Amino acid sequence: MRSQFFAKLRGVFGAAAILATLPGAILSQPSHGISMYGDPGLPPDFVSFPYANADAPKGGRLVLAEGGGFDSLHPFIRKGRAPWHQRGLVFDTLMARNWDEPFALYGLLAESINVGANRDWVEFTLRPEARFSDGSPVTVADVMWSYETLGTKGHPRYQTAWGKVASMEQTGPRSVKFTFNVEDRELALLMGMRPILQKSQWEGRDFSVSGFDLIPIGSGPYTVGDYEAGRYIEFKRNPDYWAADLPARRGQFNFDTVRVDYYADATVIFEAFRAGESSVFREGNPARWASNYDFPRVASGDVVMNEIPHQRPTGIRGLVMNTRRPVFSDIRVRDAMMHLFNFTFINRTVTGGGEPRIRSFFDNSSLGMKVGEPAEGAVRALLEPFADQIPAAALDGYALPEGDDSLRNRRALRRALALFEQAGWTLQEGKLRNADGAPFRFEILLVTGANETRQIVDLFVEALETAGVEVAVTPVDNAQYKERTQGFDFDMTWYRRSLSLSPGNEQKLYWGSAMRETPGSRNWMGVASPAIDAMIDEMLRAEDQDGFTAATRALDRLLTAGRYVIPVWYTDHSRLAHVKEIRFPERLPVYGDWIGFLPDVWWYEE
């Protein structure tokens, strides 16, 4: 008997050894969390996220003020304009992000996550207690319907990842598995971050219809309360929120009511805050921060001023040039625009010169390129195969022209005119024209009420006109602006893309070639570059942090040297003025005042 027993035991271990050698095989174990590289930083028994106050009181009211408006309560399609707060407050996801780690997720709707050896599949097991706000359970059927519907009928931001799913299957009463058709280590995490909708609510309804006929039900901490289209909306805390005591939610979503009021422009928003109509105001201008907060409510202590530091990349903010338009298809023309934008003078005029310039898309982080220096090592090795297709500056080094302290900026003007001439545009009787005599003319599209942006643009226009450029500035309302930018119907416009410490598949949406002609994509610049596509793929395939960092720095070089966006300034901290009754924890997340901060971990306290 003993010999038979050991023979069987040897057979079991032998089979396991064989399985372990098969491609993609793994003796995997479910986990409470997942990280992009290595193990998640928090243990299975963590109490709350480190930047949340686990004992924060519940109650009170937060009033936010926003520009623009909304014409829909369906935030998952391209049509319409829904309140951006709705998705984060009303809908839960399978996993929750810890904003104190570059990219780590912990169980929310899912009690566990399991992945293949090469992350070629991921499996989630739902918590039995997970509930929608109407009390009905969240089921595997809801998860599968949500993923397929968002991936095929939802906003383009959901479709990229869904296209990489080879199969989706229910593997148990509460388990669902996704198998991928490409090598992409980020997909296992992305599958944990999709909002889950209630399948039964949508039976017999067209998912593509925008408006107010149906308010989607979620499983998140808030429900949609009172609202008036375009003017205000209130989110009411669900007292029976199923996940209130989970570690990934403890100490968060504490206000009984979060109200969002909409205003015409930034000036009106500030005046509403001064008058006590809203709870908080984010100040983007250091000069105003120093001079505009001497009103009585600050002096009395009823309004508190705080600066919140962060360690995230700058992202990009400035004027984007649409390369689909012939006027900006030539990099020499875009380079001339960079020289005509006198950053030093404009920064001093608008902000008092108190802000540093954005030097690259991933500036202010370890993912940013070395400004002005040649590419080296792994970064150079990634770029060299594309040397004949990319700007030479991506390999040799590039730094933005800074300008000078004068309005005329003569040296930059001479350089800009030389670049224009190389591109076929010369000054003829004070106007920039091509060989056929056609004028160099374009339009800058802006949102009505964007006062600081308009100030920046007006200063830029003066330099453009000095160079003989004909430029029209066209302000439009929010609805027209969204329609035109989603259809790429602009020459130049204001542009902002926030970037994280864990860039991934969203980069394809921002500047992937496949998104160049996809209405609603974030690729406003219209770039279609095999080199950029290849760097994004390298980021997604990287198996360690070093490979990922090299690929991101290479991408940063291509985007910056391509001269697609004229960047302005950034700050390494946020400036928040707020009523004294709302508070936040002393321990701040690495991302600072960003996603997951306000209103998530704030609370009300008399």
Image (spheres, rainbow, N blue to C red):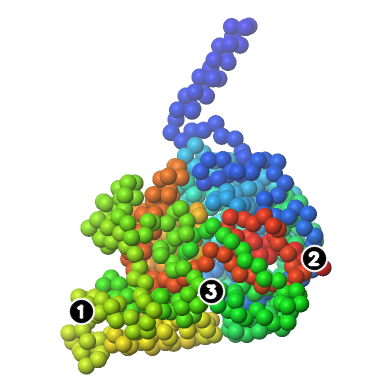
The image shows residue 65 at horizontal and vertical percentages of 65, 77
Mark with earlier residue (1, 2): 1
Q: Is residue 16 in view from this perspective?
A: yes
Secondary structure beneath disc 1? Answer: helix
Secondary structure beneath disc 2? Answer: loop
Q: Amino acid at mark 2?
A: Glu
Task: Decide if residue 330 is on the left or right side of residue 247.
Answer: left
| Residue denoted by label 2 | 605
In-front residue for pair 231/224: 231
Task: Decide if residue 10 is on the left or right side of residue 316.
Answer: right
Mark with earlier residue (3, 2): 3
| Residue 433 placement: quadrant | bottom left
Disc 1 and disc 2: Cα gap in Å?
A: 63 Å
From the viewer's perspective, is residue 55 above or below residue 343?
above
Report the residue at 25% width, 79% height from top.
414
Report the residue at 62% width, 77% height from top.
66
| Residue 329 placement: quadrant | bottom left
Disc 1 and disc 3: Cα gap in Å?
A: 43 Å
Task: Decide if residue 211 is on the left or right side of residue 527.
Answer: right
Q: Amino acid at mark 3?
A: Lys
Q: Quadrant of the N terminus?
A: top right
From the viewer's perspective, is residue 156 above or below residue 345?
above
| Residue found at the far right of this picture | 606
The image shows residue 225 at horizontal and vertical percentages of 74, 72
| Residue denoted by label 1 | 421
The image shows residue 520 at horizontal and vertical percentages of 46, 70
| Residue denoted by label 3 | 79
Secondary structure beneath disc 3? Answer: loop
